[in-house]
Image: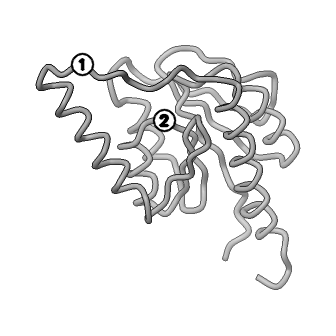
Amino acid sequence: MSSKTLSVYIDGDAFPNLLKPIVLRSIERLQLPTYVVSNKKITLGDSSLVSYIIVEQGADEADHQIVEMVEEGDLVITADIPLADRVIAKKAHAIDHRGELFSVDNIKQYLAMRNLMEKIRESGEITKGPKPFSPKDAHEFANQLHRFLTKHCSEGTSETD
């Protein structure tokens, strides 16, 4: 395994403000290059490790940019399930805003559920939509991010790899 530093990509357009300080502390502590990709100006916080990439307006422009840039082993933070699926296909990782770690084992199930709900809405059925983002969700995200970074950032420091 190469000693490439893990990079973090944030799908910035719908990134909850409650998560910004959590991510900023983690990337500063571990010195992780981070890219916030969005179609409008989003500020994560003051850090030389964070690069902001503003893409053209369009439904999936930020997603396309992230998929183009992400490499095997990198982390993408997104609530966009189709984007998470594309990221996982590139052997990278994805965590959603509520702390769900998407994987090859569960992404197709999430994608199928998302597509089913979309078909139900298109048929005229009124669905509730996701519950409002809460401090509990931010806590779950922080825990998952910590577990992920502990596992994936310590691997690169081992001399026996």
Of 145 and 52, which appears nearest the observer?
Answer: 145
Q: Nearer the viewer, residue 90 or 65?
A: 90
Q: Position of residue 12 (x, y in %)?
A: 55, 26
Q: Residues within 10 Å of mark 1 (few under 14, many from 20)?
A: few
- Quarter occupied by residue 42: top right
Disc 2 versus disc 1: distance between alpha carbons?
A: 21 Å
Q: Amino acid at mark 2?
A: Ala
Given residues 66 and 115, the one toward you in this image is 115
SS of the residue under disc 1: loop
| Direction from residue 54 to residue 136 in the image, left or right | right
Number of on-image labels: 2
6 shown above or below 151 = above
- Label drawn at residue 37: none
Would you place residue 11 above or below residue 103 in this image? above
What residue occupies the far top of the structure in this picture? 41
What is the x, y in percent for residue 110?
Answer: 37, 49
Q: First in sequence: mark 2 or mark 1?
A: 2
Residue 73: image location, x then y, percent: 59, 61
How crowded pointer 2 is (Cα within 10 Å; few <14, some 14-19, many 20+) is rated as: some
From the viewer's perspective, tell me whether residue 103 is left or right of residue 119.
Answer: right
Residue topped by disc 1: 126
SS label for mark 2: loop
Amino acid marked by disc 1: Ile
Q: Which residue is mark 2?
A: 79
Which image quarter is the C terminus in?
bottom right
* Circle nearer the viewer, 2 or 1: 1
- Give the residue displayed 58% in from the left and 23% down from the top: 133
